[in-house]
Image (spheres, grey):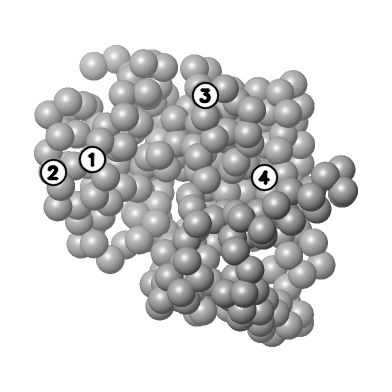
């Protein structure tokens, strides 16, 4: 086996074998699989994910969970393993995110040249790279907002989606590991990178480093998504929801300090109000109104 760089690509997975294998195949095609250490944290999959990985990609390290790690616990387990192995850089990669050729070397190079930086790729909905999805986010007074980073540009941000992010080893020394108890699944990537920025790290999105990852339907706006509002209310009891109350409260405390209670209550009030609106107006009307609003603002 060829000597690999001290960079560890960490991929949390659970019960989506074909998606996971597609991600590993992309890393193989890009030669990232042979160049870097790849660690898959399989959180109790029952669909044969771990067995398939070992059969097709024996060089990939598979760490096992019991089904209760969620995203944050899995990424933390991978980071702890990589740190113990002497990793100099840690790369978060979701298995539904497919890096373009040269993407991972590009963000890694930026981090290597600037050890105090955390660097994210810019994700797009499809391989035509027309519709940006995940990447950097800006903090407002009572909200945060995703923004696109065009090719040939590098834009600073306040926090990041965790789809494809390169972090130096030193971030663990400064702020520890992601808070898996307080934020088991959603918002942990955003809070962790925000805490890193407060600790003195520069956060940037590299526009030339691209990947394909479509929006998760739960991340789409309430006027855009076809998910019924009643399902969103039911999901409030699951860590998979962005508005899982205990996690959202910890997010609000980290971001907004004395305004935490206002931001916390505000979002559930808006959810209630929008549920009533969705009950009264057809979804197609709301989408049309949203499109008109965008045109007016632009």
Mark seen at residue 136: 4
- The answer to whether the residues at label 4 and label 3 have Cβ atoms under 8 Å apart is no
Mark seen at residue 17: 1
Is any atom of residue 35 visible in this view? no
Q: Earlier in the sequence, mark 1 or mark 4?
A: 1
Q: Nearer the viewer, residue 115 or 12?
A: 12
Q: Nearer the viewer, residue 185 or 41?
A: 185
Distance from Cα at disc 1 to Cα at disc 4: 28 Å
Q: Earlier in the sequence, mark 4 or mark 3?
A: 3
Q: Earlier in the sequence, mark 2 or mark 1?
A: 1
Callout 1: SS: helix
Which image quarter: residue 123?
top right
Query: Which dot, 4 or 3, sits closer to the camera?
Result: 3
Q: Is residue 278 above or below residue 110?
A: below
Q: Earlier in the sequence, mark 1 or mark 3?
A: 1
Q: Is residue 119 above or below residue 188?
A: above
Classed neighbour count for the residue bearing mark 2: other residues with Cα under 10 Å, few (<14), some (14–19), many (≥20): few
Residue denoted by label 3: 127
- The answer to whether the residues at label 2 and label 1 have Cβ atoms under 8 Å apart is yes
């Amino acid at each position: 086996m060829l000597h690999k760089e001290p960079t560890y690509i960490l991929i949390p997975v659970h019960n989506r074998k074909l998606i996971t294998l597609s991600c590993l195949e992309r890393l193989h095609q890009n030669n990232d699989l042979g160049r870097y250490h790849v660690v898959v944290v399989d959180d109790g999959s029952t669909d044969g994910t771990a067995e398939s990985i070992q059969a097709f990609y024996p060089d990939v390290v598979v760490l096992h969970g019991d089904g209760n790690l969620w995203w944050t616990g899995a990424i933390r387990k991978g980071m702890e393993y990589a740190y113990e192995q002497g990793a100099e850089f840690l790369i978060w990669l979701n298995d539904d995110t497919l890096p373009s050729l040269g993407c991972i070397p590009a963000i890694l190079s930026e981090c290597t040249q600037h050890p105090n930086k955390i660097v994210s790729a810019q994700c797009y909905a499809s391989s035509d790279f027309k519709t940006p999805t995940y990447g950097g986010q800006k903090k407002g007074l009572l909200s945060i907002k995703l923004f696109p980073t065009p090719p040939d540009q590098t834009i600073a941000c306040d926090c990041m989606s965790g789809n494809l992010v390169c972090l130096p080893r030193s971030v663990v020394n400064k702020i520890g590991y992601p808070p898996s108890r307080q934020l088991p699944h959603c918002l942990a990537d955003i809070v962790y990178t925000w805490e890193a920025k407060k600790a003195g790290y520069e956060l940037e999105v590299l526009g030339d480093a691209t990947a394909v990852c479509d929006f998760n339907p739960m991340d789409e706006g309430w006027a855009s998504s076809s998910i019924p509002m009643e399902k969103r209310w039911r999901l409030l009891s699951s860590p998979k929801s962005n508005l899982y109350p205990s996690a959202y409260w910890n997010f609000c405390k980290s971001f907004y300090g004395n305004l935490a209670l206002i931001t916390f209550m505000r979002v559930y009030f808006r959810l209630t109000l929008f549920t009533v609106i969705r009950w009264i107006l057809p979804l197609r009307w709301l989408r049309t109104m949203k499109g008109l609003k965008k045109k007016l603002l632009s």
